[in-house]
Amino acid sequence: MRSAAIALVLLWWPSGLLAQGGPSPGPSEMSLQVDLREAPRRIFHSRMRIPARPGQLALRYPKWIPGEHGPNGPIGDVAGLVFTASGKRVPWHRDPDDMFRILVEVPQGASEIEAQLDLISPPPETRGFSGGASASARLAVLSWNQVLLQPEEAAPARMRVSASLRLPARWKFATPLKTERSGEIQTSFAPVSLEELVDSPVLAGEFLHEIPIGPPGGAPHFVELAGESEDLLHVDPQLKSQWDALVVEAQLLFGAHHYRSYRFLLTLSDDLAHFGLEHHESSDDRVPERVLLDPDLRLSRLAGLLPHEFTHSWNGKYRRPRGLATGDYQKPMRGDLLWVYEGLTNYLGNVLAARSGLFTADQARGAFAFSADMMSAHRGRIWRPLADTAVAAQILYGARDDWDSWRRDVDFYLEGDLLWLEADTMIREAAQGARSLDDFCKRFHGGQSGMPAVEPYTLEDLVAALSQVAQLDWAGFFRKRVFEVAPEAPLGGIERGGWKLVYGPEEPEFHKSFEKARKLVDLKASAGVVATDDDRMVILDVVPGSPADKAGIPPGTRLAAVNGRKANGDRLRTAVADTARAGKLELLVENAETYSTHVLEYKGGLRYARLERDGSRPDLLTRIFSPRANAQGR
């Protein structure tokens, strides 16, 4: 994206005519009609009118999607592709070297072509980001980039699009787009740039509530809540007040905003893929359907999600690493600064969850203990620096669960908690409490409130901005923490914050909710295994160097029995707890059609990470988590 591109909404002109120096053809735009009436069957219909000149027209299907950090455009789910000119079909073929490039033969006398395609939305629970499951019998999420083709010559910021939408009977919708005309059959939106259109998803469904949040005055904020049934959508007053506080605390943190209004498009469904995806003026937030009714789901899947995606409006959408600000859906994005884009966002999202009351102080500490424990278990850090998990994000997002601890995952999220907590406490120590990372956020992400815009930055820009807040060796800090191999997880922020990471048999609330929400048995810190908590009990991962690893247990296999009895989650936990007495446990593993017995020599019992207060240091962590709305100082 290019700076202020959405605000300017420039027109697209056929560059061939202008290059020839001929007369100006007058403004032209692409029209896009999307029909979701068959969304319950997982088919989205799309029709386009695209400006064209006689000869070969190259069209592109969006490939690199902002926020997804990879070439994830679901071209394989496009069907029914047909082109016509003046009512007659015209031939087309795919570029054999680029599956996302379509070449159309435009006949003489034609000034535009009509195109139609269908998007086949994946079946329920198909994983992925916006290319995952996006429709059910009662609701759908439309990502415009999935149902359109763009002229190859047209930059997204300069291509003007008039879009319209048809919905099933009784369905409602929510989107950041401005409605121009709304009828019983079709809704038309005000023309925008292609860039703004792709940045403005639509949540539609039979059961949809709009909940205004935040203080009165200024830019309006909403939670647009859609679910599979009406009974799933009750928001209790406490949660509503926490969402109100989230808006207030974010404004205090950044000091300005870069949107006209903001909408959390919150989808409650077990049939859709679960994730959060950021946009300038909205976020696509998809969670389990009972998230408002189940405390474990609410803590593990919702409490930190909205603060994280909201933070992205400042860190990721407005301030964006130069390698991710391509302004083009075909050019590869460079993720080398994702430890800022996502890592800083993860840290600030957890801080805002604490300041707004979405996390209690104990839950917030639990989140940081969880991050520290997870990053300690990822023994792949002895060969892979954090920086490489960012550069390789496009392949790590789709990595399997087996040997995750040895491979490393997209660790820039959770290690970002630790990295930026350390940076925050370093600033607070150096400034003797007079400044903090909040000051950096105002300087780097704030500015003047206004329209959506993009301000790219480099690592050098980041270091310079931090140095204006605290004169420290930031380049050296990042070199050591990010770019060099670091065998141990960075715990300096926890320790400077007046706490220490300890292990004990009592499972913290945050970890327990994580296990229940994802149906896992997470014993990384003790036996060294992570398994599904269901009838099949698949061993997802084994921590290198752990008792399970030394016993030769292979991940990606089924745990059949624990100490001679059929395996289940409770029996595995009980057996691990009993190792403090017995000194070992025996696991029967099914590997394809072969069974093997593995004896774990282990005496440590259950071990879960938590933070314990260190009275020898000031309690900076509690200060960081404290609401700014009620505080006079830091």
Image: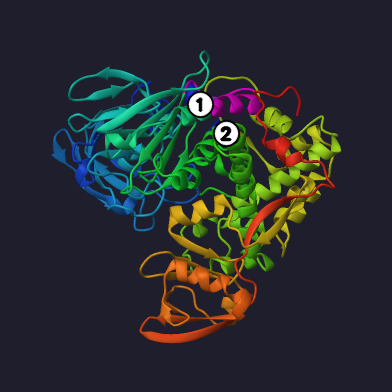
CA neighbours of label 2 inside 10 A, class few (<14), some (14 to 19), many (20+) = many
Q: What residue type is labelled 2?
A: Gly
In front here: 128 or 613?
613
x%, y% of residue 435?
Answer: 79, 31
In front here: 389 or 332?
389
Task: Name the residue carrying label 1.
Answer: 241
Task: Name the residue carrying label 2.
Answer: 357
Query: Does the rendering let one see residue 412?
Result: no
Residue span colored magenta:
245-261
Using residue 399 as the reference point, say whether residue 349 is left or right of it: right
Would residue 181 be counted in the magenta stretch? no
Q: What residue type is labelled 1?
A: Ser
- Residue drawn at 56 percent across, 43 percent down: 324
Circle 2 SS class: loop
Figure quadrant of residue 391: bottom right
x%, y% of residue 253?
Answer: 65, 28
Q: Which of marks 2 and 1 is nearer the N terminus?
A: 1
Would residue 251 be counted in the magenta stretch? yes
In the picture, the disc for residue 452 is none
